[in-house]
Amino acid sequence: QVQLLESGGGSAQSGGSLRLSCVVSEGTYRSTCMVWFRQGPGKEREGVASIDADDYPMPMYADSVKGRFTISRDNTNKVVYLRMNSLDPEDTAMYYCAADSAVPICSLIPVDYRYWGQGTQVSVSS
C-alpha cells in the first residue's frame, strides 16, 4: 500500500515563497514517478511538476509555474519537495502529491497516477 503525506501548505502574500513536502511510504520509491498537482476553486485538477527516478532526473513543469517552482526529491528519506517562489494569488489551490511506478513517462496527467495524498492547502493573498 502506497501512502503519501503532504505538508508545508499555508498562507503567503503575493511574491512570497512556500515549500511543500511529500513523504512517501513505498518500497519501490526509487522507481517511482512523483508529481505535484493542484486544484483551485472551481477549477480542474492540473499537473504542476513531475520528477522521475533517474540518478539525473529531468523535471517537468507546467508553463504557469516554470521559473518559479522547483521540484526535487530526497531519495534517502523518500521525500519529494515543491519549492514555490514568486507566489501569485492564481497559485491558490489544494496541492496534491501523487505517485506511480507504472507510468512510462512522468506526465502531468492526473489519470496516469494511482496513488494520491490528501492534499495541503496553499492560499496566496495579494
Image (cartoon, rainbow, N blue to C red):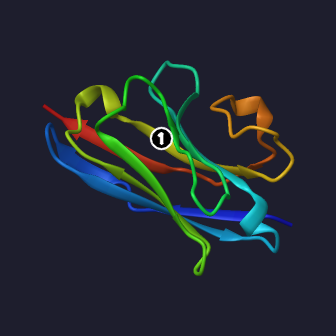
Residue 18 quadrant: bottom left
Q: Which of 37/43 is in front?
A: 37
How far across and down, in percent of the image, does residue 36 sit? Answer: 55, 44
Q: Which residue is mark 1?
A: 94
Q: Residue at x 62, y 53 (%)?
A: 118
Q: Residue at x 77, y 61 (%)?
A: 31
Q: How many numbered discs? A: 1
Q: Residue at x 74, y 57 (%)?
A: 32
Amino acid type, callout 1: Met
| Image position of 114 (left or right of 90) | right
Q: Which of 115/77 is in front?
A: 77
How far across and down, in percent of the image, does residue 10 sit? Answer: 31, 54
How far across and down, in percent of the image, does residue 42 sit? Answer: 49, 18
- Up-down: is 75 above or below 122? below
Residue at the extreme bottom = 76
Circle 1 Cα neighbour tier, 10 Å, few/some/many (<14 / 14–19 / ≥20)? some
Q: Quadrant of the C terminus?
A: top left
How far across and down, in percent of the image, does residue 22 sit? Answer: 55, 63
Q: Say which element carries label 1.
A: strand
Residue 54 quadrant: bottom right
Q: Residue at x 68, y 28 (%)?
A: 109
Residue at the extreme front = 56
- Up-down: is 108 above or below 1? above
| Image position of 62 (left or right of 24) | left
Q: Quadrant of the N terminus?
A: bottom right
